[in-house]
Image (cartoon, rainbow, N blue to C red):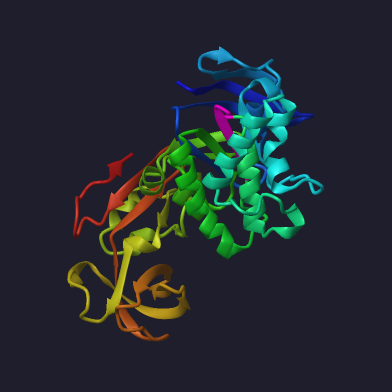
Amino acid sequence: MHIEVRDLNKWFGQYHAVRNVNFSIEPGQLIGLLGPSGGGKTSVLRMLAGLERPDSGEIRFYDKVVNDVPPQERGIGFVFQHYALFKHMTVFDNIAFGLTIQKWPKDRIRARVAELLELTGLSGIEKRYPHQLSGGQRQRVAFARALAPEPQLLLLDEPFAAIDAKIRKELRSWLKSLIDRVGITSIFVTHDQDEAIEVADEIMIIQQGSVEQKGTPWDIYKTPQTPFVAEFIGESTILTNVHTLKGFDSTSAWPNSKALIRPEYIEVGRVGELRLASASERGIVKALHFRGSEWLVEVAVGELTLKTYRTLENPVLQIGEEVQVLVHRIYLFNEDDHWVMENPLKEDPMPVHI
């Protein structure tokens, strides 16, 4: 095991920022720490880096406890949210800074910087200063500088937060490709779900200082293990009277339960368009939101308002139009349990516990 955290706790005064956190990371994995602001993500990252000391628990690198090992001896590269480049230094000197501090030979520094300039697509601009670079270029310099000393672990604290949306999307793919090529174990903090889903091999969702769930993006999205994860990941609608929908009348046996329905688990079509008409409801289109690649449709089914997607290949619905609505599955939860339930009129007749 490359990284292992055991019963990690951190207090700031009376505030319990990190609560009994446990996880492990295999070599070469890219892990996304995802969660709401103030949830404890950055505190975990800073303790891994040695910038904060745990109040209790252990941090292990290759089975060695590093709680008392200073940051410069942990073999870590750190990329900050706002680049933290030296304004008076060229791109070359910024990348070479850590190597110079470590007193690498000059010829080895030149070779390593040249390698990183090529790797990060910065060749030809090594003599420029930070103010002469775009936001995306500055962040690439920050990545190159962090990778220069050949660290065992790369930590990134919301690395794309200071970059505009278009460049941020481009850098996501670039970062994923870079990490795959370098093969370095990496952990990045983000509050952007799309970013975590697109970039990470595994996601660790942290809320109120605790790990809610850890797994692949698909596993977390498909089978959330807590109500918080179910509500936090993806777009959804929370209902308390889902028993009024066809196929879900048995949910009335759990009077204190709530149901979460994601848009992709709902089909909407013009009357006669859906194949499973006997399992579908009649609804009225209340609102349409164009999302570029699809429509987000708000539809009223009785007293319920549901949200679903409709592709651009299908005819555009109209506000006020009567439509058919088919709910395929729901995520049902209460204080004691949670489970996924398929519509028994088209799938299994029993809840699927997870």
Q: How many marks?
A: 0
Magenta segment boundaries in residue numbering: 150-157
Where residue 137 appears, as percent x and y from the top left, is 63, 55
Q: Closest to the observer: 313 or 177?
A: 177
Q: Residue at x 27, y 46 (%)?
A: 351
Q: Horizontal placement of 143 versus 229: left or right?
A: right
Q: Residue at x 51, y 17 (%)?
A: 62
Q: Closest to the observer: 265 or 280?
A: 265
Q: Residue at x 37, y 47 (%)?
A: 218
Which secondary structure class fits the magenta region best?
strand
Where residue 268 appears, as percent x and y from the top left, is 31, 73
Q: Horizontal placement of 147 versus 245: left or right?
A: right
Is residue 40 visible in the rendered image? The answer is no
Residue 261 picture quarter: bottom left
Q: Which quadrant of the rendered structure holds the N terminus?
A: top left
Residue 5 picture quarter: top right
Q: Is residue 352 within the magenta segment?
A: no
Q: Which quadrant of the rendered structure holds the C terminus?
A: top left
Q: Is residue 152 within the magenta segment?
A: yes
Q: Horizontal placement of 333 versus 166: left or right?
A: left
Q: Horizontal placement of 331 versus 80: left or right?
A: left
The vertical placement of 190 against 240, above or below, is above
The vertical placement of 264 against 334, above or below, is below
The vertical placement of 73 against 294, above or below, is above
